[in-house]
Image (cartoon, grey):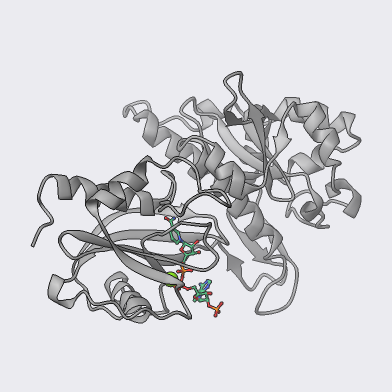
């Protein structure tokens, strides 16, 4: 039996660690030490997924929150459902709470079937088999909700947690073979790495870098929509970075490709992990064009439409709380508060109100 983690992981007695530092060190240690990570599972909190949909609970106020079980509670539930502890060990580490409790995600749906999933605990095909969704929901008192819906039902504190968990679970489910040798890969206990069984390669979870930019001409901001967006929704321009590009190069290329403009005055705002459709690392920026060079030439193979919007139009759109329904009059709808696009738009509005963005 391992020593209690709090002792194992504490800072040297002469130096007091801040709680942030000790949490980061706890996570780092659990990634490196399979035994410590397996021990942490029992006292940790585990967020359940079924076929990549997170388990949510409805609160008394009708809102939704994530539902995390302790390792021991989950163990009893798994036992009741005819499963065993080896399924618990397929959990992946996603972080650590402010109370220094390790946080994990576990998919009990059909994608978990992966004989030899763990490097240290051999599993037969059966032990990592799918659990019945309705039976798990009943035992846990929650509902598995598609991530696209769940992400926007949760608060901005909880949404990134399930997004990260789903992205990590998805990465494991789609990286079971080494792309160099074709051999199966195996994970460490935390799920922060996969190893080729031939010993020739280590793989780490990946995100694709995406630049997202709100272009301003001083009094208006530029938003575009793809045909696949929900009705009425426009967002900041975005695009995947090409191999070898800087953030600035990717930004200038994307704007040139999509709307035919040359931007200047690029400034970085903030970033976010975006789980849709796969894992992207969104790098949010502002940029500008002069009003004399704001004529759009939209590439309709990329965007259904792109337009300049005034401060009044954006201010009204920020008040719209739900997407327009079929039959409703056309209304501009902006990406929801969790999206970095929304943050860029709000920053632009603030700057306009302070008169900072005008030419
Ligand atoms: N969080 C937020 O606020 C927002 C997030 N986004 C996200 O930004 C992402 C990128 O925006 P989008 O305008 O679609 O990007 P792009 O303008 O780069 O166009 C997407 C196309 O680029 C190609 N592509 C190149 N590299 C990749 C890669 N690594 N992964 C996937 N496709 C690639 C694909 O073309 P092909 O299919 O022809 O191969 C794809 O259809 C989207 O996933 C979107 O969800 C967008 C707006 C707001
Ligand atoms: Mg794009």
Please report the residue visible at 65 percent of the width from the left and 37 percent of the height from the top.
47
Residue 254 falls left or right of residue 99: left
Q: Residue at horizontal 60%, vertical 42%?
A: 150
Image quadrant containing the N terminus: top right
Residue 280 pos. (x, y %): 48, 61
- Looking at the picture, does residue 330 appear above or below residue 305? above
User: Is 200 above or below relative to 79?
Assistant: below
Q: Is residue 172 left or right of residue 133?
A: left
Give how far across and how far down residue 116 sits, in percent.
80, 57
Regarding residue 185, the answer to whether it shows in the image is yes
Q: Quadrant of residue 75?
A: top right
From where the camera sits, is residue 30 visible? no
Image side of residue 105 versus residue 72, left or right: left
- Of residues 4 and 183, the one drawn nearer to the viewer in this rendering: 183
Viewed as shown, does residue 323 lie left or right of 340?
right
**Image coords of residue 337 (percent x, y):** 41, 43
Q: Is residue 28 above or below residue 135?
A: below
The number of numbered discs placed on residues in the rendered structure image is: 0
Residue for point 52% across, 31% down: 8
Residue at 57% from the left image edge and 20% from the top image edge: 61
The quadrant where ligand 2 appears is: bottom left
Point out the image quarter for the C terminus. bottom left
Tell which of 204 and 174 is nearer to you: 174
Residue situated in front as seen by the camera: 87 or 319: 319
Q: Position of residue 159 (x, y in %)?
A: 52, 41
Task: Look at the picture and state if 231 lies above or below 239.
Answer: above
């Amino acid at each position: 039996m391992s020593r209690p983690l709090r002792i194992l992981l504490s800072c040297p007695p002469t130096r007091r660690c801040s709680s942030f530092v000790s949490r980061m060190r706890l996570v780092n240690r659990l990634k490196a030490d399979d035994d410590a990570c397996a021990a942490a599972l029992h006292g940790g909190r585990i967020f359940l997924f079924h076929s990549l949909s997170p388990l949510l609970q409805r609160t008394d106020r009708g809102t939704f929150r994530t539902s995390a079980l302790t390792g021991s509670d989950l163990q009893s539930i798994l036992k009741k459902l005819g499963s065993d502890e080896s399924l618990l060990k397929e959990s992946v580490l996603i972080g650590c709470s402010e109370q220094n409790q390790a946080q994990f995600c576990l998919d009990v749906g059909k994608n978990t079937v992966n004989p030899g999933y763990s490097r240290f605990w051999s599993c037969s095909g059966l032990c990592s088999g799918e659990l019945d969704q309705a039976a798990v929901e009943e035992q846990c008192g929650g509902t598995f909700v598609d991530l696209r819906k769940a992400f926007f039902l949760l608060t901005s504190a909880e949404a990134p947690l399930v997004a990260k968990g789903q992205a990590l679970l998805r990465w494991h489910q789609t990286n079971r073979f080494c792309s160099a040798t074709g051999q199966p890969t195996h994970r460490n206990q935390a799920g922060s790495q996969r190893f080729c069984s031939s010993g020739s390669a280590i793989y780490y979870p990946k995100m694709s870098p995406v630049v997202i930019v709100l272009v301003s001409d001083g009094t208006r901001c530029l938003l575009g929509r793809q045909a696949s967006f929900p009705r009425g929704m426009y967002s900041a321009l975005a695009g995947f970075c090409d191999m070898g590009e800087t953030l600035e190069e990717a930004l200038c290329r994307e704007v040139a490709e999509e709307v035919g403009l040359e931007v200047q005055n690029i400034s970085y705002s903030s970033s976010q992990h975006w789980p849709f459709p796969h894992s992207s690392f969104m790098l949010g920026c502002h940029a500008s064009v002069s009003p004399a060079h704001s004529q759009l030439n939209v590439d309709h193979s990329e965007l259904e439409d792109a337009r300049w919007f005034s401060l009044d139009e954006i201010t009204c759109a920020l008040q719209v709380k739900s997407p327009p329904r079929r039959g409703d009059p056309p209304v501009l709808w902006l990406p929801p508060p969790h999206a970095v696009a929304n943050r860029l738009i709000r920053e632009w509005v603030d700057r306009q109100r302070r008169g900072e963005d005008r030419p």
